[in-house]
Image: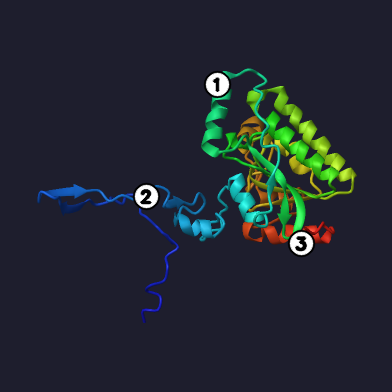
Amino acid sequence: MLGGFFKKTKYITMPRKTQVKSISHLNFLGVQEEVQPSIPDGMWQKCKKCGQILYTKDVEEQDQVCPDCGYHFRLSASQRIQQLMDPDTFEPWDEDLVLQNPLQDNKYLEKMKQLQEQTGLGDALISGKGSLGGYAIVLGVMDSGFLMGSMGTVVGEKLTRAIERATQQKLPVVLFTASGGARMQEGIFSLMQMAKTSAALAKHQEAGLLSIIVLTDPTTGGVTASFAMLGDIILAEPEALIGFAGPRVIRQTIGQQLPEGFQTSEFLLQHGFIDQIVTRKEMKEVITKILALHEGVKV
């Protein structure tokens, strides 16, 4: 009769107008005081899709996916690498590359220093070599938490170097995109990275090597308009925003309502822009199978 009474609760629904009642207790002088109960920061989080209040630890155990509706929360680059790569195999490259601040923008330079301290990253991309499912690959992962994953000179250079080294070592490339596009604080220098990364990927493909691009939320702007859509195989996470200009900008420009689900992974799959939508739990298995089919190099 009490079989489900002690079952672990995965999430709770909280009414919007719920008022937390204070708790009365006696202090060491015997005087009654009112104490407001406190909840540790980060213990709970709200799903952006279904609105459920979720226990953070449960979300972490589900690879940052909502256990109720399947919404994929955004991941940092380090979280992505930890989930994807075989343990203790990833070797980061070019961590010493530093911002040159080509437009001599002091406010931009200060912002970058703050982000570096907050995130522990040098810029919005981590690249390197490691093992995935037992296969040697070159990996590049963009981090949307670092200036919205925008591509400036450092990101473009790190990505280009990684692809070129993959070509030299005859290894497949796996790239995870998450970006607001080319970094406007670097002007034309950021736009140059679109051509540079695309050229490096083209040479990698000309050498007969495999490139897999995984589009995550969001992938927009100059990144979408360059290397992100040039992979041999293009995968995407569910319901990711993928496009060039944002839907609000397009709607205001053309003065028309956009189709339902426009610029989502599902819309792009339906119209032939991507090859497959893969959930986060299945991602490593799917990529491993692709590497095996293309006779990847076993470590």
> What residue is shown with label 3?
289
Q: Name the residue rendered at 53%, 34% in the picture.
A: 117
The residue lying furthest to the top in this view is 104
The circle on residue 40 is 2
What kind of element bears circle 3? helix
Q: Quadrant of the N terminus?
A: bottom left
**On the rendered structure, is 70 left or right of 164?**
left
Q: CA distance from mark 3 to mark 2?
A: 42 Å
Of 196 and 120, the residue lying toward us: 120
Residue 226 in view, yes or no: no
**Above or below, comparing residue 248 to residue 111 in the picture:** below
For residue 84, above or below residue 155: below
Mark on residue 80? none
Q: Find numbered disc 1 in the image and state the secondary structure of the residue it sits on.
A: helix
Using the image as rendered, state which of residue 51 and residue 279 is in the foreground. Answer: 279
Tell me if I can see residue 223 in this picture. Answer: yes
- The crowding category of the residue bearing disc 1, from other C-alpha atoms within 10 Å (few below 14, some 14 to 19, many at least 20), is few
In the displayed structure, would residue 150 be above or below residue 242? above
Position in image of residue 48 (x %, y %): 50, 49
